Image (cartoon, helix red, strand yellow):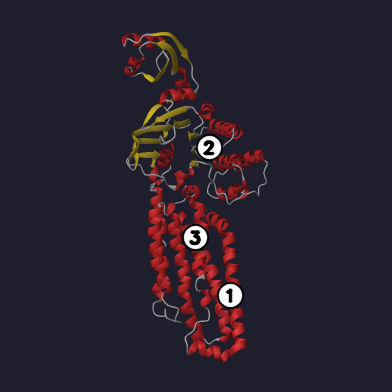
Amino acid sequence: MTNALLFKEWKKTKWFAIGAFAVGLALLAYIFLKLGRSFRLVGLEHLWDVIVNRDQFLFRDLKYFPLATGFCLALAQFVPEMIQKRIKLSLHLPLPNKKIVFSMLGFGLLALTIIFVLHVAIVLAFAGIYFPKEIISSIIYTILPWYVAGITAYTFMSWICLEPTWKRRIFNALIMFGTLQLCFLTDFPGAYGLIILAVLLIPFYVLPFGYFSVQRLKVGIQD
Amino acid sequence: MQQAIVECKNLTHYYGKRCIYENLNFEIPQGRILGLLGKNGTGKTTTINILNGYLKPRSGECLMFGESSANLSPETKRKVGLLIEGHVQYSFMNISEIEKFYSAFYPNWRKEAYYELMKLLKIDPKQKISRMSCGQRSQVALGLILAQDPELLILDDFSMGLDPGYRMLFVDYLSEYAKAENKTVFVTSHIIQDMERLIDDCLIMDYGRIVMQKPVNELLESFKRYKFTCSNPGYIDEISDIYNPVTIKGNTEVYSLLGKTELQNLFAKYNVSASEILEENLSLEEAFIGLTGKY
């Protein structure tokens, strides 16, 4: 039964997930070509100086990709459920409601994690060719909050979509924008080193909110 | 008396300050097809939503197979086939995918019942539901319910958006299935001619209350329209057993469960001077109008 639920989610989001992965690859290709060009034009020594002495970050173009992916995946997954209150069909399936909602959210998190892990792995594989492990570690600390923002954006946007009233949706959106700021406080390389664990936990705090909105929908709260 | 599959006790619901109904009580007996008839805004969909646990009533409770409808267990949900208003289904799937999807949830899934109905549509199994007409979508939704083989079918406004051919197909299939398999059906529709061909019992709602719950044949045998000429129709309003009297240019029309003789006696008692009383049998639609009024 869980597999059938996951199949349903895959059917809804398949083209979006493949598209997001393809756009991610295209973005990486653009960044790598740009860096390759810089290597050739100004030389590796100059780039090294820029990274180490001037604290410049070479992968800044990645910044908003995870965020946009998280937003759009939640929309692709939950807007069709809310149109014509199709979620009633899902909640009528012979499973506990909690399991239904968390399976849907779990699918989204899994899909995002796969896209993001592959994306980060490619970045690190590329960076590993040219840079030492200290810089690699700094890259990880810098880009990780952006990817966490992507997952947080997904959980928040799911919550907004599943919420039955517009007034509360606006309230949820304000909380979302405030919370997402925590992932974009600075681009300074490695600045999140000490608080990265706290940032990683943000999506887990937000995850149950979607279920609470479904409970509100279940008792018939509406505009 | 058959066992009640659904029991609604003292249901009261308001949207804001607007009262939908107060202390509504009804039961759905096992093996019967019960039609909920009411004008727009009388609370048909509200009742269906409460029944399925998608709306918490202000007070009262609804029991389905003995369980509170607000918290149905997976086992009870499995016994209930649900058709949402507008034949809503997962439109991003095609007809073979949606059949495979649902089959995973129901151990007694009857694939052949679904495909038998799909054959009539003469469409490619790979066609997406979103690209189908409303009529075709209604058959997909019905086919899925028949394949689920539930004990109770709840169908909200099944005739919405359907042309006469599809409505007839829907009614014939459903009626044959429910009678052959002794299923319990709770159905609403705004097209009452369809209901007449389908339902055993009717529950007629007006704003805020149930006007009547009776087997359809009993209602049609006893509920009559009387036409007569009357010089003092104002007195008719005082008689409680008469529904929706209307007088136009001295010609009066009333509806009642009383026989002609009883009505004449009542008129005599209330000094209503009625002559040339004509008794008429009614269709379910006319009976509905007689009970709830034209406005």
Give amino acid for label 2. Answer: Met
Q: CA distance from mark 2 to mark 1?
A: 50 Å
| Chain letter of the residue beneath label 3 in the structure image | A
Which circle marks residue B160 in the picture?
2
Residue at the front extreme?
Answer: B249
Q: CA distance from mark 2 to mark 3?
A: 31 Å
How packed is label 1: few (under 14 Cα within 10 Å), some, or many (20 or more)? many
- Determine whether, in the image, residue B5 is placed left or right of residue B150: left
Dividing the image into 4 quarters, which one contains the N terminus of chain B?
Answer: top left
Dividing the image into 4 quarters, which one contains the C terminus of chain B?
Answer: top left
Residue for point 50% across, 22% down:
B283
Tally of marks: 3
Give the SS element for disc 2: loop
Of labels 3 and 1, earlier in sequence is 1
Which residue in the structure is indicated by mark 1? A28
| Chain letter of the residue beneath label 2 in the structure image | B
Circles 3 and 1, Cβ within 8 Å, touching? The answer is no
Q: Position of residue B25 (x, y in %)?
A: 36, 33
Q: Position of residue A34 (x, y in %)?
A: 59, 80
Which residue in the structure is indicated by mark 3? A74
Give amino acid for label 3. Answer: Ala
